[in-house]
Image (cartoon, rainbow, N blue to C red):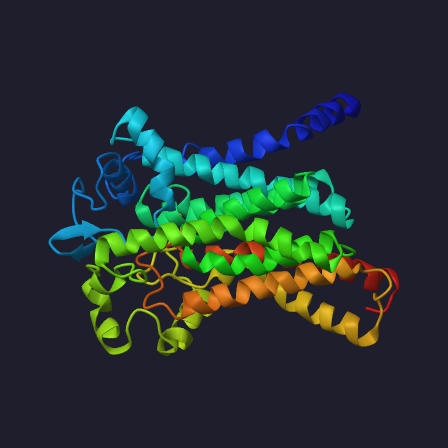
Amino acid sequence: MFEPIMLKASRLLKHIYFIVPAVCLLFYFDLVKPGYKSVDLNPHLNYFRDLADAFLHGRLDVINTINDRDLVHFNNKNYLYWPPMPAILYTPLVALFGNQLPDALINSLFGILNVWLIMKIVHQFSEKFQLKLQTKHLVWVGFFWGLGTVHFYMAMEGTVWFISQIMAQTFLFAAVYALLKMKSKYGALLVAGLFFAAAGYTRNNMVFAGFFLVLLYVSMHPRMPWKEWLPKGLVFGLPFIVFSILNAWYNYARFGDYFENGIQYHLMNPYFDANFKQHGYFSTAYLAHNFYVEVLHWPSFKFQFPFILKEEEGFGFMWGSPLFLLLLPAIFLQIRSYKNNYASQAIMHSHRLIRIGCWAAALPIAFVIFCIMGTGWYQFCARYTLDFQFFLLVYLLFSWQVLSVIRSNRHF
């Protein structure tokens, strides 16, 4: 009786890379909730689409926007202060289908691509670094990322703020997957470098993800001769250099300054005026407040679906994704394992490099986020923190090995 059921279950597991993203897409479009109402596919707040249309008409300013909310106003023209990579990606879509695109659908498709990529990445981690993960673990990772983080909330929206972060994740994951999967060493480095550059010029703080990518590559090639590092480093860094030169020209063409992105001219919400006048856009004066709001602040509840309220500044990502509370015991176990030398023979040096890479990327990204003038506006959880949550998840994955060794040796 149970054999047919188990057979069907095993067949389903073979298609998890399709099933898990497909289920996430149902949630992104709210199709599984009673009382479903149609999604606004074109919310008219995707300035990347407008910038793509401007590119096609030989301009750098946007003129087709419904309003000027959060745009840059300079010399009687409206510009974007966000890096332009998403607009470049939108350009062929606008060229083919026009300026009225289903932005929410497009963002959701990038969202499920992220779910697919993270499952593939974890599978590669398990194979290459002997994590001994099973298919069920890949399923849980996919659902956690797709539905258990702020990625879930952001993938449903087709506005400029959310599109930039979702696409940045896509580029980051593609860079990691290229390093893990591609056979050609120089080819993998070039492709990874291209996607890394795209991530950095979608969300500038993602440049610190380079620390993780470098240490990941080192962990995969521990015996590579030093003389090979320079040419391979140049291959990896070449796309970023090219993108940086083009971005400098883009800034100069708009504002007459290679390093000006327009943030000082942007039409901000009056809520931020006082802080901007006193401390500017980026300052350590914001650090304590932003850390509290984006990490520790407890959410507000209501007795109606979805039970957790959106808030002006958001609330701590640790409560939006409670799995990350395991970081505390994971760090403790790592320290204890090193101190007592329980697991030194069992845990590969590559694991340590990757764990170091996780924090080398996550901490500076988090620092930048916590020093920005605001925490995001009227949101569920803390959307900026999505930029570093991947590294926290990878750290957890590479910490289970320590726990299993300690338990098997009965020292814990």
From the viewer's perspective, tell me whether residue 74 is left or right of residue 2: left
Q: Is 312 above or below relative to 97? A: below
At a point 39% along the width and 58% down the height, the residue shown is: 301
At a point 46% along the width and 33% down the height, the residue shown is: 26
Q: Is 147 above or below relative to 17? A: below
Q: Is 296 above or below relative to 161? A: below
Q: Decide if residue 199 is in sight here.
A: no
Where, quadrant-wise, is the N terminus in this rendering? top right
Between residues 353 and 339, which one lies in front from this camera angle?
353
At a point 79% along the width and 23% down the height, the residue shown is: 3
Q: Decide if residue 161 is in sight here.
A: yes
From the viewer's perspective, tell me whether residue 117 is left or right of residue 4: left
- The answer to which image quadrant residue 283 occupies is bottom left
At a point 39% along the width and 38% down the height, the residue shown is: 107
Q: Is 52 above or below relative to 273? A: above
Q: How many marks?
A: 0
Where, quadrant-wise, is the C terminus in this rendering? bottom right
Between residues 62 and 332, which one lies in front from this camera angle?
62
Residue 85 position within the rendered picture, expressed as x and y whole percent measured from the top left:
38, 45
From the viewer's perspective, tell me whether residue 214 is left or right of residue 281: right
Residue 45 position within the rendered picture, expressed as x and y whole percent measured from the top left:
25, 44
- The answer to which image quadrant residue 142 occupies is top right
Between residues 9 and 225, which one lies in front from this camera angle?
225
- The answer to which image quadrant residue 100 occupies is top left
